[in-house]
Image: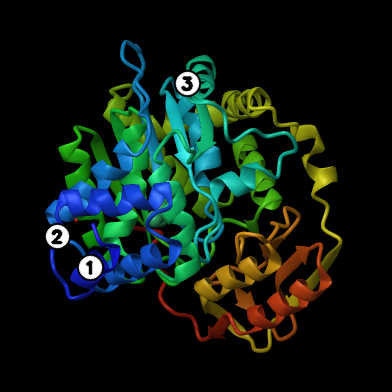
Amino acid sequence: MIPANLISKKRDGHYLSKNELSDFINNYLTGSVTEEQMAAMLMAIYFKGMNEDEIFSLVQIMIDSGSTLDFGGSNRYIADKHSTGGIGDKISLILAPIMAAAGIKVPMIAGRGLGFTGGTIDKLESIPGFNSSPSLNQFKKWVDENGYAIMSQSIDICPADKKIYSLRSKTGTVASIPLICGSIMSKKIAEGISGLVLDIKVGSGTFMKSIDQAKELGSWMKKIGNLFDIKTDIIFTNMNQPLGRYSGLACEVEESIECLKGNGANDLIDITLELGSSLMIQSGLVRDRNQAIDVQKDLIESGKALRSFEVSVATQGGKLEKLKSSTKPKYETLILSKSEGVVNTFDTEEIGWALVELGCVKKRKQDDLDHSAGIEFLKKTGDSIIKNEPVYRVFNSNKKTLDNAAKMLIKTINCGKRHADQKLIFDNA
Ligand code: URA
């Protein structure tokens, strides 16, 4: 295999066979295909796309690059949720314990920051001691004991995704339907699940900017789910403004805890319960959506979902009692509105890049994350605003990057006359 020939073949829009893709990816894992060559291949895929055979092969090759989990013999439904990534999207942290408390097992393999979107693992690692890289046996034991556990892509599970994911983030090749399908579906299939709900985000703060693109991605994910015999539901949700009240690292863990205490922002809790309802209906634990919503609300009100979260974090070594003191930001500033009226839209992608600047996503491999960093959203779309009223509270522990992010954020608010309300959850048809 000559890597440059395969890159040229894809660059010119030709089909790559399963053997060709497999040679290219496996040689990348051993180091004989270089970072530059993989970056060029990813860009060629980004522009030329992949056909059905190539997408299915990509998923299979990513799965075969590592081990898979097997929960054979479990008397519980095994399922998971995954999101295509957004700003302030902390739903995995909230939904997994609710599902575990409901009796569904969730072996969640999650990602780090990607492009301008934050990663579940980076958020969880704000908790001192949290172990996101257990051995597979350890992970399975935690899932069996507590009903759920969350680990990062590792050298055991989908190592090809781990390596390619980080390169995509640095090479502007995230927003590619075949690459998103390969990345998400390989991790989920390797978990040994029977059911999956995908939260496909649509709008300015995510990779699929239009509902048509999002639907195309959804139909591919569903085809892959069917091929691997996984019940797959897709929910399309609005990412034209950040989700919930905060986006960042430790602050999103704290907001998730508030949500599990019953104090969640409406948009956050509505989407969480919708995704949870899909899994609960798939599992057969409930008759319909209404019952699924009631059960989930009860699990929050009774404190069982919060307890599930606390037990799981402690099992993974996390010391929640040290979260606040160890992630206290050194600096903060308010971003004030320059105009008045009603907040109509946000440039949510730019908010994401401001979060990257603050230290919530790595720009380069050698960078450190700033777990104290984040943004509090003091206004949401539809809110009235007067001149000089605060829109964002921004915080981190590095004055220079805080100032840079503050400059970026000033341009992200768009107010004027009231626009029609946007849907939070789009129709599935
Ligand atoms: N989440 C993933 O795990 N992979 C992607 O490509 C996008 C979101």
Determine crowd level at label 3: few under 14, some 14-19, many 20+ residues with C-alpha closer than 10 A: many
Give the camera-side residue of 294 and 212.
212
Give the camera-side residue of 291 and 136.
136
Compared with 90, 229 (above or below) is: above
Determine crowd level at label 1: few under 14, some 14-19, many 20+ residues with C-alpha closer than 10 A: few
Compared with 268, 178 (above or below) is: below
Report x, y in % for residue 386: 69, 83
Could you say whether the residue bearing mark 2 is in a helix, strand or loop?
Answer: loop
Dot 3 or dot 1: first in sequence order is 1
Cα distance in 3D space between marks 2 and 1: 19 Å
Q: Amino acid at mark 1?
A: Asn
55 horizontally vs 27: left or right = left
Report x, y in % for residue 118: 56, 57
Report x, y in % for residue 179: 32, 58
Residue 401 visible, this orientation = yes
Compared with 357, 139 (above or below) is: above
Residue designated by label 2: 51
Task: Please name the residue shown 79% across and 49% down the image.
Answer: 327
Dot 2 or dot 1: first in sequence order is 1
181 horizontally vs 391: left or right = left
Residue designated by label 1: 5
Cα distance in 3D space between marks 3 and 2: 35 Å
Q: Amino acid at mark 3?
A: Lys
Quadrant in the picture for the C terminus: bottom left
Report x, y in % for residue 96: 49, 33
